[in-house]
Amino acid sequence: MKPVRFRIENGTNVIIENEKKFEKLCASLSEAGMQDARNLSMYDFRIRMEYFEDKAENLKQKKNAD
């Protein structure tokens, strides 16, 4: 298996992509009413993400049951 490449040869950069994903998650949490998601510890951030993932799954199941 080849190591991850960090150069932008093919238009993708793992670090930049991860930063974008993190910013999108922070924006989603902000829309859900959570302030300062960027300042949370990694543990607190993950717990909150799990909470919102569980909540979304419950809503999806409830919608499918109706």
Image (spheres, helix red, strand yellow):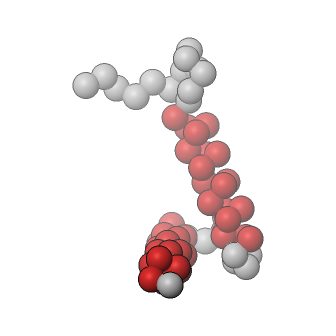
Q: Nearer the viewer, residue 46 or 52?
A: 52
Which residue is at 50% across, 84% downward?
A: 66
Quarter holding the N terminus?
top left
Q: Quadrant of residue 3?
A: top left
Which residue is at 69% across, 75% downward?
A: 32
Residue lying furthest front? 66
Residue 44 in view: no
Residue lying furthest left? 1
Which residue is at 55% across, 44% downward?
A: 18
Estimate the x, y position of residue 22 in percent, counting from the top left.
60, 54
Q: Quadrant of residue 2?
A: top left
Q: Quadrant of residue 40?
A: bottom right
The vertical placement of 62 against 19, above or below, is below
Which residue is at 74% across, 71% downward?
A: 31
Estimate the x, y position of residue 51 in percent, counting from the top left.
50, 79
> Horizontally, is 43 left or right of 3 in the view?
right
> Horizontally, is 61 left or right of 3 in the view?
right
Estimate the x, y position of residue 58 in percent, counting from the top left.
47, 81
